[in-house]
Image: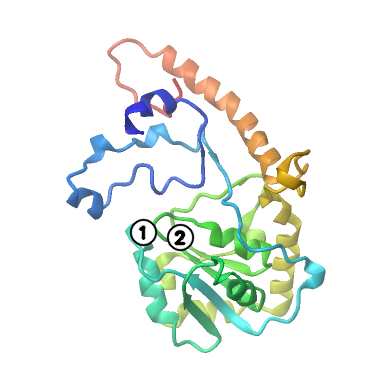
Amino acid sequence: MFHVREEISPAVLLVVDFGGWYKADSKASSNGNNMSDMIQHTQVSLLKDVIVPYTHLLPKLLLSENQKRQTLLYFKGAKHRHRGGLVREKLWDLLVNEPGVIMEEGFPNATGKEQSIKGMRNSEFCLHPAGDTPTSCRLFDAIQSLCIPVIVSDNIELPFEGTIDYTDFSVFVAVNEALQPNWLVNHLRSYTDVQKSKFRQNMARVQSFFEYDNGYPGGIGPVPVDGAVNHIWRKVHQKLPVIKEAIVREKRKPPNVSVPRRCHCT
């Protein structure tokens, strides 16, 4: 699709994050790619584009159904990743033998789904380290499971920020702190039951924001008022004045004047 990038880049793009768009890595370099072959950072931009949630794979747990959780921290996924996800392998080695921590290799597919449901619903916190890209559906599975997300991904971009304050129900940890021996586990154990309960209450209030399913057979029917589809359209609407401003600013630039482009809006 690289040959049509100039045609599609001015559009409002719906993306789950920016991790795979323009960051060159050692793997790309070794394959002979360079930055001229990659989509540039102005072609995907928080100024014009909308971060959307992954579709969660696990069913929704209501706050009224929540039960006492026995595990401190849970993670299920692939240990080995590329790019920024190399932190995952280091975290795995630090945490795999910690009491109260479960680190499982695998994915919530047909065979692992029940295991993931049990693991997330039985854990106070769910680890969300960067993978091949800064985010994944794991974060939204944790929210639907009322498992407090622990986000170790310095470059993450999240859906509907400004409408949602993720600090109300998530723990954000810098990579360099998370990789200090014993730091992460001690930090999570410092949260009181009252604080964790408040996190889950706040999480329950926004679970619907990440729901694409409208509950009708085949999806034919009205979308939920507070569901993901409506919130995506609200975000697109919020972007329009900023995009119009960027276009006007670009038009009034005198010929042969080099000014850094704010976004690829035209």
Amino acid bearing label 2: Ser
Q: Which residue is drawn at 74% across and 61% down?
A: 204
Amino acid bearing label 1: Gly
Q: Which residue is drawn at 25% across and 39% down?
A: 35
- Tell me residue 43's x, y (percent): 40, 32
Q: Are marks 2 and 1 in contact (CB under 8 Å)?
A: yes
- Tell me residue 143's x, y (percent): 65, 62
Disc 1 is placed on an element classified as helix
Q: Which of the two residues, 74 or 157, is positioned nearer the viewer here? A: 74
Q: Image quarter for residue 166?
A: bottom right
Q: Name the residue under label 1.
A: 84
Ranked by sequence position, the earlier of labels 2 and 1 is 1
In the rendered view, tell whether residue 157 sits above or below residue 44. below
Q: Which of the two residues, 5 or 71, is positioned nearer the viewer here? A: 5
Q: Mark 2 points at which residue?
A: 153
In the rendered view, tell whether residue 129 sits above or below residue 216. below
- Tell me residue 218's x, y (percent): 71, 44
